[in-house]
Image: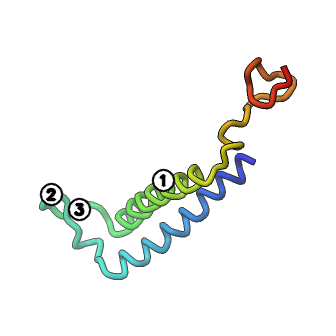
Amino acid sequence: MFTQKLMWIVWPAFLAACMLELLVFAFVDPTELEWAGHPLALSRQAIYTASFFAFWLVSLGACWLTTLLRMTPAEINECPFDKSKRPPGCPGNAN
């Protein structure tokens, strides 16, 4: 279940980062970018790569927050231990 939830976060974030990359660099030339008034000393491909990973991280955060907010109370309060190893007071424990 963890890998499925991870893919619910990573895959849409990857697609969003791809779309952002296409949209931003359709209008911005990476060789004309500046940082603190100085031109970036990076190649065009390095700027594309760094910006893609920055877009991906921001999109990952948004997708993670969406996944977190859609959790049901049962999922949040679920005991993480196996039924045979649950401590007293754990939700769903028959003790």
Q: Relative to residue 48, is residue 56 drawn left or right?
A: right
Query: The residue under label 2 is which amino acid type?
Result: Ala
Alpha-carbon span between mark 3 and mark 1: 26 Å
Residue 50's tag is: none
Callout 3: helix, strand or loop? loop
In this rendering, which labeled residue sits more in front, label 3 or label 1? 1
Amino acid at the residue labelled 3: Leu
Residue drawn at point x = 54 percent, y = 62 percent: 13
| Side (left or right) of 78 relative to 9 | right
Q: Residue at x 24, y 60 (%)?
A: 41
- Cα distance, mark 2 to mark 1? 27 Å
Q: Is residue 1 above or below residue 90?
A: below
- Percent x, y for residue 88? 76, 18
Residue type at mark 1: give it: Gly
Q: Which residue is mark 1?
A: 61
Marks 3, 2: nearer the viewer:
2
Residue where numbered disc 2 is placed: 36
Q: Earlier in the sequence, mark 2 or mark 1?
A: 2
